Structures are given as structure tokens and as C-alpha cells.
């Protein structure tokens, strides 16, 4: 099924179909467990009535052997059944997480709903597990039903009236407990919230105590801290009391069920309708009866939670924006780049092919929009509509006149290298972060590449040079070091059209000047080899990069566009304010 048509219920149905064999096997094995648990007290009672009361050693051996087989059945059934259910659940968790990772990391992923990385991580780690729990819970639910049938059959066989009474009283007791527990739990939850609020207040006071001490407010702060502490202690005692009431209610209702069963059973024993062993069996089965009933209720609740979690997973998988493009135009190093953005004075805004152009934007909102467009290659129509408050056209990035959104996302990097402002590094060597699995260029080109990105200076501080190991997300590097490596990656790969966003914002002015000079030299070297320097578009306000550029395009706040050089534009007061802020 297409991800765009995916819903939580269809996701669950597909999951259950895929694990049908494991679920059936788990139900069969877990049913042996629940049936065995129900039969243990029944076999103990039968042993008392038929072997101990009759003082028959052969019968005692037979019933003890039956009891041993019952224990073997229930222990093996649970172990193997739980393994089957959990393996199916874990497999589906893995498949869902893999599917989400492939979905959100696909080059064509353009979600219509903005999601923070933390939300995606929570859905991937938590909601997938809750969704797949339905596999294990379904196995437990059906096995609980089998155990319930065994309990009911034994109780009715042992004594019709006692069996009917227990089968009527136990569900009523469970219903009363289900009615009572949420009410006591709500009181406990409110008290836990009070504890959290009091703790947060105390933490805030402690965090500012040094400042308060400096202005002589430590006494008042101490008093407020003591008040918060007393409030937290009071709420803690009350919460423990509420928890105790819940546990007491559970014991009370379970005791009432057993007391009723014992009273009726004793009456039947006195009437001679039932033996002592059978009475013990009835009491044991009656006590166990609440377990499959509770499991059935838990299965329904778990199913509700799984549906809600599956809806969130399905919503993430279905939110992929437009269908990815399929076009694969011929690669051109000097590709003509253009921006078709509503609100610009020139549409489309065309950049001269094969040149180094820096785009300067006076309007912060437009600058942010262009930065996102140049980092992702397209803009969602829904995002544009929200921005404009109406059904506005989306901004487009054109490559040789073709909308980048219509180009196959897997093929687009062969035409255009887009480097966002934020540097994303992977775990591996510096070399792997720059060229991946590809071979390094020739020594002269490599030297120019490293200088154009500032990595040549960085390698002098790393003992292993290009083989220096980078931790995940570059945590063992500074922001400027990460940015240099990311810039080297963007400049590698030979002649290409490239789009860079503030590639030198995290480096010092001396390094930035070296990078600007290195860019010019790298492009000159590529042009001298006959391959072409490639079109380079940079969104930046760095005076150093502006001075090195072949052309500067200044987008004024009113949407007008000026094409010139940095030196000529320096006489423009508005331009000078933008690049000097």
C-alpha cells in the first residue's frame, strides 16, 4: 500500500498478517501455559481426594506425575510462546523503524507538516514499540481466553452452583476494581503533579540562590525553599496513601471473591456434594480466574494504545509531501541556476552559468525562505500558503530551466551539490566525511580543495590527518572545524553546480580570507583543466566572500534586484548596512 494512503488501522492489519504464523504459534503455546496454571490447583485437589484420602500410593504417583507434566507444559508453553510473540513484535519494531528511517532520509522527503527531530525520534523509538505490542498482547489475550474457558469448565464440573456463583462474582469484582482504581489513581496523579511542581520550584530557587545572596535575598529564598519542600513532603505522603488505598482495594475485592467461593464451597462440602480436595481446587482456580480476566481487559487497553501509536506512525510515513521527481537531465558543470520566488522583482532570478555569485538579501524573512529553498531544492505549496495566508505558489529552484523538485532526488546530487548552513558529519574518518567511499583527487587538486575549505590548517592540528576519526555528528570537533569539513565535502566531486549557505560563519576572519582565496584558486585550476569551474551560488553577507565573488546580487527589502560587484555596491548605504551588521 502507498504510504500516502496509510492509516494506523491498515498498518496494524498488515503487521498482524505478516506475523500470523508467529501469533498462532504463540497463542497455542501460551494457551498451554494458561490452561496449565488453571489445572494446577485442580490436580492438587484431585490428588487429595483420590490418592491421599484413599491412601493409595499408586494413585499418588500417578497424580503427582500428572502434576509434574502440567508444570512442564505451563513452563515450556510460556517460555516458547513468549519467545515467539516477542520475536514477532521485535521484528515489526525493527521493520517500522527501518521504514521510518528510509522515509525521512530519502532525498525526496518533503513533509507537509513541520516536525522537530525530537518528535520524529519519539515516534521512531516509542510509538513503534507501542504499535507492535499488539502482537504480543493479541497472543496473550487469546491464550487468556483459553485459560478462562478451562477455569469455567473445571468450576462447572466440580460443582454447578459453586461454579456459577464464582463465574458471576469474579467478573463483578473485577468490574468494581476497574471502576474504583481510576478514581484513586487520579488522586494519586494529581498529588504526583504537585510533587513535580514543588520540586521544580525548589530547583529554580536553588539555581538562583547565588544571585539572591548577592542582593541579600537569601533569607527569603530559604523560606520559600522550605515551604516548597514541606509541600512536596506533604504531597508525597498523600500520594503514598492513595497508592496504598488502591492496593488495599485490590486485596479487599480479591478476598471477597475468595470468601464467597469458600463459603459456598464449605456449604457444598457439608452437604456432601463436594470433597475437600475439590474445594481446594475450586479456591485455587477461583483465585487464578482474575488473571485471564485481567489479561483480557489489558489486551483491550493495549489495543487502544497501539491504535493511537499506529496512527502517529502512519501519519509520519504518509507525510512525504509531493511525489519525488523522475527526470534525469544531462549533467552540466556550468548549469544555469535560477530562483522563481513570489515576491522577487525578477522572476525567475537567473544566475550567470559558470560564475561565482554571492546572493545578499536585505529582508530577513526572504533570506530565511531562500536559505531553506537552496538547502532543500524545493518548497512545499502548503508552506507557501501558510506564509502568504492564501493559496500562494511555492518557490522553485531551477536547474537549466527544470524545477529541481521534478528531478530524481537520487540523481540530483550529480547535477547540483547543495550544502546547508548546519554541518552534518558522520562517524568515520575526515577523509570519509569529505569524499565518502570515492578515491581522493590528484595531489594538486586535493591541496587546493583542502585550502579552499580551510581543512589544510585543521589537518595540522590532527595527529592522524585525513584518517582522524570523527565521532557521530562531529562531537569531538568544534563548530568551525565541522564547518570546514562540510565545506570540503561540498567542494569535492569535480566540476558541479553548487549552492552554499553561509559556509564560513563559524571560522575566524583570517581563515575566512584564506578560504575565499582558496575558492578562487580552486575554480581557476578546474577551469584551466578544461572541465569548467562550475556554477557556484553562495547565500552570505561575508565581505570576504563578497569581494572574491565574480558577481553580487543584492535583493533589497522592496524586492528590487541589483547586479554588480562588492566594490561597486559598497557605495549603496542599504547594502552596506546589510553586509556590515
Image (cartoon, rainbow, N blue to C red):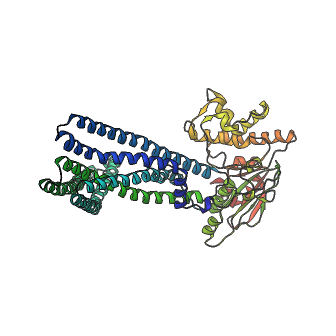
Left or right: 460 in relation to 164: right
Residue 426 on image: x %, y %: 61, 40
Quadrant of image for the N terminus:
bottom right
Left or right: 467 in relation to 63: right
Viewer-nearest residue: 345 or 406 = 406
Residue 351 on image: x %, y %: 79, 56
Left or right: 242 in relation to 94: left
- Image-quadrant location for residue 159: bottom left
Viewer-nearest residue: 288 or 124 = 288
Residue 469 on image: x %, y %: 60, 32
Location of residue 241 with respect to 515 vertically, above or below: below
- Image-quadrant location for residue 148: bottom left
Observer able to see residue 313: no
Q: Residue at x 67, y 46 (%)?
A: 503
Viewer-nearest residue: 66 or 35 = 66
Q: Residue at x 48, y 54 (%)?
A: 131
Residue 282 on image: x %, y %: 23, 51
Q: Residue at x 26, y 44 (%)?
A: 43
Q: Residue furthest top?
A: 463
Location of residue 304 with respect to 212 vertically, above or below: below
Q: Residue at x 22, y 54 (%)?
A: 254
Q: Residue furthest right?
A: 530
- Image-quadrant location for residue 473: top right
Q: Residue furthest bottom?
A: 390
Quadrant of image for the C terminus:
bottom right
Viewer-nearest residue: 494 or 20 = 20
What number of labels is visible? 0
Amino acid at each position: 500500500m502507498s504510504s500516502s494512503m496509510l492509516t494506523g488501522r491498515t498498518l496494524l492489519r498488515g503487521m498482524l498478517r505478516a506475523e500470523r504464523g508467529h501469533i498462532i504459534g504463540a497463542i497455542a503455546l501460551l494457551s498451554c501455559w494458561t490452561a496449565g496454571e488453571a489445572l494446577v490447583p485442580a490436580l492438587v485437589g484431585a490428588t487429595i481426594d483420590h490418592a491421599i484420602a484413599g491412601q493409595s500410593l499408586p494413585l499418588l504417583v500417578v497424580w503427582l506425575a500428572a502434576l509434574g507434566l502440567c508444570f512442564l507444559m505451563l513452563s515450556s508453553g510460556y517460555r516458547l510462546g513468549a519467545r515467539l510473540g516477542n520475536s514477532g513484535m521485535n521484528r515489526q519494531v525493527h521493520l517500522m523503524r527501518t521504514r521510518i528511517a528510509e522515509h525521512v532520509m530519502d532525498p525526496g522527503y518533503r513533509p507537509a507538516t513541520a516536525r522537530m527531530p525530537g518528535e520524529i525520534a519519539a515516534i521512531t523509538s516509542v510509538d513503534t514499540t507501542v504499535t507492535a505490542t499488539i502482537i504480543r498482547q493479541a497472543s496473550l489475550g487469546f491464550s487468556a481466553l483459553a485459560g478462562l474457558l478451562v477455569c469455567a469448565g473445571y468450576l462447572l464440573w466440580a460443582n454447578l452452583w459453586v461454579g456459577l456463583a464464582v463465574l458471576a462474582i469474579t467478573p463483578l469484582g473485577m468490574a468494581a476494581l476497574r471502576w474504583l482504581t481510576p478514581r484513586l489513581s487520579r488522586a494519586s496523579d494529581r498529588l504526583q503533579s504537585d510533587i513535580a511542581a514543588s520540586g521544580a520550584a525548589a530547583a529554580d530557587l536553588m539555581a538562583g540562590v547565588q544571585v539572591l545572596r548577592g542582593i541579600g535575598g537569601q533569607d527569603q529564598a530559604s523560606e520559600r525553599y522550605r515551604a516548597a519542600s514541606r509541600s512536596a513532603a506533604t504531597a508525597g505522603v498523600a500520594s503514598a496513601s492513595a497508592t496504598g488505598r488502591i492496593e488495599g482495594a485490590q486485596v479487599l475485592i480479591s478476598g471477597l471473591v475468595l470468601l464467597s467461593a469458600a463459603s459456598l464451597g464449605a456449604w457444598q462440602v457439608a452437604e456432601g456434594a463436594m470433597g475437600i480436595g475439590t474445594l481446594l481446587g475450586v479456591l485455587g482456580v477461583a483465585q487464578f480466574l482474575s488473571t485471564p480476566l485481567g489479561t483480557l481487559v489489558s489486551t483491550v487497553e493495549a489495543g487502544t494504545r497501539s491504535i493511537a501509536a499506529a496512527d502517529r506512525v502512519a501519519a509520519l510515513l504518509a507525510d512525504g509531501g509531493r511525489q519525488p521527481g523522475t527526470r534525469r537531465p544531462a549533467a552540466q558543470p556550468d548549469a544555469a541556476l535560477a530562483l522563481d520566488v513570489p515576491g522577487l522583482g525578477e522572476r525567475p532570478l537567473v544566475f550567470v552559468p559558470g560564475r561565482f555569485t554571492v546572493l545578499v538579501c536585505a529582508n530577513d524573512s526572504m533570506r530565511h525562505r531562500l536559505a531553506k529553498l537552496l538547502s532543500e531544492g524545493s518548497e512545499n505549496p502548503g508552506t507557501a500558503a501558510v506564509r502568504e495566508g492564501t493559496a500562494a505558489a511555492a518557490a522553485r529552484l531551477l536547474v537549466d530551466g527544470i524545477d529541481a523538485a521534478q528531478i530524481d532526488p537520487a540523481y540530483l546530487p550529480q547535477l547540483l551539490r547543495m550544502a546547508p548552513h548546519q554541518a552534518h558529519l558522520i562517524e568515520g574518518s575526515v577523509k570519509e566525511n569529505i569524499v565518502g567511499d570515492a578515491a581522493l583527487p590528484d595531489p594538486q587538486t586535493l591541496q587546493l580543495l583542502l585550502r579552499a575549505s580551510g581543512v589544510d590548517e585543521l589537518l595540522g592540528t590532527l595527529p592522524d590527518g585525513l584518517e582522524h576519526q570523527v565521532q557521530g555528528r562531529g562531537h569531538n570537533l568544534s563548530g568551525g572545524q565541522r564547518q570546514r569539513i562540510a565545506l570540503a565535502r561540498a567542494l569535492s566531486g569535480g566540476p558541479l553546480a553548487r549552492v552554499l549557505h553561509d559556509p564560513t560563519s563559524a571560522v575566524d576572519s583570517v581563515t575566512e580570507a584564506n578560504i575565499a582565496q582558496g575558492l578562487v584558486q580552486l575554480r581557476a585550476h578546474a577551469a584551466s583543466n578544461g572541465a569548467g569551474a562550475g556554477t557556484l551560488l553562495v547565500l552570505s553577507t561575508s565581505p570576504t566572500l563578497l569581494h572574491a565573488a565574480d558577481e553580487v546580487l543584492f535583493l533589497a527589502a522592496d524586492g528590487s534586484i541589483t547586479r554588480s560587484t562588492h566594490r561597486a555596491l559598497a557605495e549603496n548605504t542599504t547594502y552596506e548596512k546589510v553586509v556590515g551588521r
